[in-house]
Image (cartoon, rainbow, N blue to C red):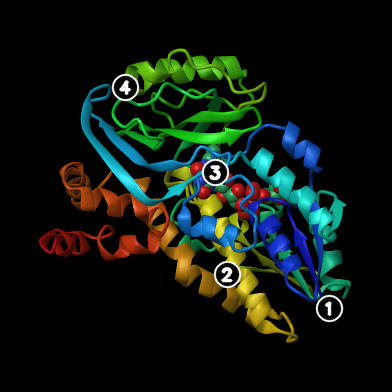
Amino acid sequence: MRRVLVVGAGHSGLQLTLSLLAEEDYDVTLISARTADDIRDGSPMSTQGMFHQALETERAYGLNLWDDTVPHYDGLHITLSAPPGQLALAINAPLDFPGQSVDQRVKMATWLDLAAERGATIIHDTVGHDDLDRYTSSGEYDLVIVAAGKGDLVSAFERDAARSPFTTPQRALAFTYVKPLEPDPAWPAPHIGFHAVPGHGELFVIPALTRSGPSDILFFEAVPGGPLDVFTPGMDPADQLTRTLELAARYVPWVHERAEKAELADTRPTLAGRLTPTVRKPVAHLPGGGIALGMADVVVLNDPITGQGSNTAAKCSAAYLAAILAHGDQPFDEAWMTSTFETFWDNTAKAVTDWTNAMLQPLPEHVQMLLGTAAGEPAVARRFANGFSDPTDFADWFMTPQAAQNYLEHLQ
Ligand SMILES: Cc1cc2nc3c(=O)[nH]c(=O)nc-3n(C[C@H](O)[C@H](O)[C@H](O)COP(=O)(O)OP(=O)(O)OC[C@H]3O[C@@H](n4cnc5c(N)ncnc54)[C@H](O)[C@@H]3O)c2cc1C
């Protein structure tokens, strides 16, 4: 029986715990800073829009408990508000397979209860550096994994400067869960709205299942210091909604038309804050000589502009699971940890990080040309949408002027 300690009961930690418990011969201890009730009754942490490839990693272990109740989305409706407030471009970009967003308060609370039911040892505690030192050197565990998101424990992992181009937040983030909006006349089927206001930021509209049932999330990504950067952490939810609607009326009036009667979805429906995109080295070395492997946001934290963090957390969980199973009874040493992360980086996280960091910049000419073509060419629109499920595809046609030119030349 191999003993695994997972620190952090968020997306990646819970998915890995539940997947390991479904395999034979793994004894899993999970440390959660919060109880299931704390998570369920607390404030939302994410908009967690997910796409097919990542959802399939959950389905492989029967963790898709909301497939029948979540409002699925069929694609992305992308608009360009330029000059601000005027519709310059609109693209309907269908997904080959539907995506979904289940509020992490619902999903993680349920998964945490499930982990306890299925035999994980659950410890409720906030792990500090001294605790991590103790756990990694006690000899009690064959493997210690830190899946504690973007909390303080990340400082146990060294920043990887070569893979981290930013030292400050690139967007101020503010979202509000509201009761479902009026359908979009531009595309009545459920979809994600991706509304770009060049130079100022973006407004996303994401259908989701939250505590009170189906909802929409109005999510502003504001360029820091710009006119959309008006939200403060802990702001009164009603005020946050009012500001959101004021900005929508001014900058994205076609969303405001559907949202002007929007009501808060529950009593704690908002979040506002900012993060600095950061990649970290995968192995923490603790003073007592122990080591721990970082996973998901701990080691690859991207801005949510491309909606990839939960998707990447799911894929990271699947990648680490495969590496653990393949390793059998051999020691989970530093070489194994490094190669496990580097494989995940090469296969998944690098493409996500490159694409996400590019989307935070003013869009280069070749991307503007691709999106312009997508407005009249369904194949291009479809390829863009499906890149949200498999971002490794972007390297072949989207990321460089040369790749874009080759793609457009060969487009039938
Ligand atoms: C505003 C916003 C919008 C987003 N929208 C999307 C989206 O649309 N699509 C998408 O794919 N991703 C999105 N994301 C990203 C996504 O939510 C995260 O990337 C994903 O949840 C990361 O999973 P994780 O397992 O690394 O960490 P988390 O899911 O954050 O879990 C970490 C867990 O560890 C716990 N913890 C922290 N510190 C400790 C400690 N010291 N001891 C014990 N426990 C601890 C926390 O309480 C938490 O439960 C968004 C993020 C933000 C901020």
Q: Earlier in the sequence, mark 1 or mark 3?
A: 1
The secondary element bearing badge 3 is classed as loop
The residue lying toward the viewer, choosing from 69 and 270, is 69
Q: Specify the label residue 48 is tagged with.
A: 3
Q: Is residue 240 left or right of residue 44?
A: left
Verify CB contact (< 8 Å) between mark 2 and mark 1: no
Q: Which amino acid lies under the numbered mark 4 shown in the image of this protein?
A: Trp
- From the Cβ of disc 1, is ligand 1 less than 8 Å away? no
The secondary element bearing badge 4 is classed as helix
Q: Earlier in the sequence, mark 2 or mark 4?
A: 4
Q: Which residue is mark 4?
A: 254
Q: Specify the label residue 324 is tagged with.
A: none
Q: Which residue is mark 1?
A: 1
What is the x, y in percent for residue 81? 27, 29
Residue shown at 12% from the left, 60% from the top: 412
Q: Which amino acid lies under the numbered mark 3 shown in the image of this protein?
A: Gln
Q: Which amino acid lies under the numbered mark 1 shown in the image of this protein?
A: Met
Q: Earlier in the sequence, mark 3 or mark 2?
A: 3
Q: Looking at the rendering, in which quadrant would you find the N terminus?
A: bottom right
Q: Is residue 101 left or right of residue 373?
A: right
- Bin the neighbour count of mark 4 within 10 Å (Cα to Cα): few under 14, some 14-19, many 20 and up: many
Q: Looking at the image, which residue sits at the far front?
A: 68
Q: Earlier in the sequence, mark 2 or mark 1?
A: 1
Q: Specify the label residue 319 is tagged with.
A: 2
Q: Which amino acid lies under the numbered mark 2 shown in the image of this protein?
A: Ala
Query: Label 3, label 4: how many angstroms apart (C-alpha)?
Result: 24 Å
The secondary element bearing badge 1 is classed as loop
